[in-house]
Image: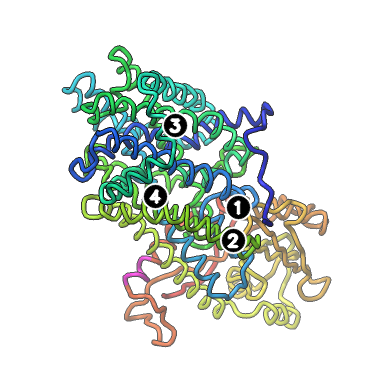
Amino acid sequence: MDGPSPATGPRSTHPAARGLALAALGVVFGDIGTSPLYSMQTVFSIDHHAVTPSHDDVMGIISLVFWSILLIVCVKYVSLVMRADNEGEGGILALMALLRRHLPVHSRLTGTALALGMIGAALFFGDAMITPAISVMSALEGVAVVEPTLTEVVLPASVIILTILFVLQRQGTAAIGRAFGPIMAVWFLTLAALGVPWIMRYPQILAALSPEWALRFVVDSPWRAFVAMGAVVLTITGAEALYADLGHFGTRPIRFAWFCAVLPALTLNYLGQGAMIVLNPRRISNPFFQMAPGWATVPLVVLATAATIIASQAVITGTFSVAHQASRLGLLPRFSVFHTSRKESGQIYIPEINWTLYIGVLGLIAVFQSSGRLSTAYGLAVTGTLLLTTVLFLLLARRSWRWPLPVVVLIGIVIGGLELSLLIANMLKIASGGWVPLVVAGAAILTMTTWRQGTAYVATRRAAVEGPLDDFITGIRDDRPVRVPGLAVYPHPDRVTTPLALRTNLEFNHVLHEHIVIASIINENVPHIAHSQRVQITDLGAPDDGIVYLECHVGFADSQDIPKALALAGDLLPELQLRLAEAIYFLSVADVRPADASNSLPAASRCAMPAWRRMFYVALSRNQADRTKVFRLPRARSVVLGDVITI
């Protein structure tokens, strides 16, 4: 099969890889690593205890859990999907961009890939809002095993802990990963240590590793197996975050950590929980904490709380990555992106996303008030994202890598069929809480589609106001306006139309600067562009008129730093280097306003969106991140000029 060669896997023992693997434990695997806290408890409580703690049911459930992890996480994500890194970046949007790069621009499949990527990203946002709430609450609820009256402290303690976590995001992924990595290493050792004694008491549980028990459970009790699948999915939550966080650590450390620590610990713990339930069926109320001896319960609650804080971190960092990619791909407005590492460009902090998530998490805690109730809302978004990732990956494997059709079909049937079963089973939860991630995903899809449609309309109207750049330069040559000393830089999307600020500056001040650079940031469907390949300069008009066009090509994980682009262009145009310190930056701003009775547009010129969506687009446009920050422009030498565009 053709395709990219997989990166070095868990065989690597390079010190740098081991260090990153430890940090990855603290960021990437927190979500899936804390699933044992609540997943088995949910399995035996779902649908009014439809699944019983009998020997055959337990063996069937443990087998389903093991093979779900093996097929979806090990085979699909770790072995297959992580091959589809978009020059180091992961996540469903990076996968979508990679696929679209290999498809004809205007083909129907290109539009389908975009739609699937948008839906998958939206579902990921829905899942990201639930994970911190359910993870932290499930850990703190362990105090009820020690003292039932302490249940009242769970909600306020959850709010305090999550507040601290979201405040700490500004410190960056690397700092948090270094702090959390050793804690998660202890956590995974604890998972294994809790499971091993119960496996030794009931070694027959090892037979559940055979797929025979899962198949027997499905055949003998199809309805109960179907219902159980709605809870089994909780054991693989975090798989998509694992892929989305690829840009933070790389393929090798993630694979190394998964095969050497995470997978063995999860397997031993789930086997141990199964053995304990077979021997003590009454312990299904909270099987994880009841695995531990009485003296260890309180320390285990403390450790579990720390681990669930880290689980929240895995999803938060993944959300930053997905939102950043969506913005750079034109699906969301500009964000205030802070790069928190000088070495890893994928390590970022987005305050707008951080605090939106925080408000949503607090809302879920207030509404559901327990992890048991919140578990009914969990899983639907996860399974939807899993299935969409599979579809996009198989399209990529077939259309770009030219994998044989039988191989693609086999993967689709085995893994896609399992994920489709999980999705259908989770649809039973819609009325009891599954609507929550659907509402969040729906809001995200509405935002993305509104932004794309509104931006396309504004670009058309703006182009009409700006006029052709070639005509403008011809007019300058004929009119010969006064030229004043200095370098003026006009950020602008392309070289087709005239920057609004340039046209406005000439109309009002009747002068032009001696040297003019029209600078375009060209976003490519790749994560990174090498510095040596970023900048291109084109002379506009006559060679001696001092007007040039600069293209800076960047990937969706690169910074859009215009002063840096000018510095890179210094080798091509030495006079730029000499005048860079005194450059004045003129930002063209289209002040988007809703049409009203006084400035209504002809029907043929109106945006096709309903009035309420136009108002929503205007609100999004006005609340974008400051472009001086996005383009890294010095505020003291930045001027804003533009025009009004009604929508």
Residue drawn at 56 percent across, 66 percent down: 588
The residue where tag 4 is placed is: 382
Q: Amino acid at mark 4?
A: Val
The residue where tag 2 is placed is: 396
Q: Quadrant of the C terminus?
A: bottom left
Asked whether disc 4 touches disc 3, contact meaning CB atoms under 8 Å apart, the reply is: no
What secondary structure is found at the residue carrying circle 2? helix
- Residue 641 screen position, x and y as percent: 55, 66
Depth order, front residue of 113/81? 81
Pick whichever of labels 3 and 2 is earlier in the sequence. 3
User: In 3D space, how far apart are the residues under numbered discs 4 and 1 (Cα atoms)?
Assistant: 20 Å
User: In 3D space, how far apart are the residues under numbered discs 2 and 1 (Cα atoms)?
Assistant: 8 Å
- Over which residues does the magenta segment extend? 612-616
Crowding at dot 1, Cα within 10 Å, few <14 / some 14-19 / many 20+, comes out as: many
Q: Is residue 15 above or below residue 503?
A: above
Q: Amino acid at mark 3?
A: Thr
- Disc on res. 267: 3
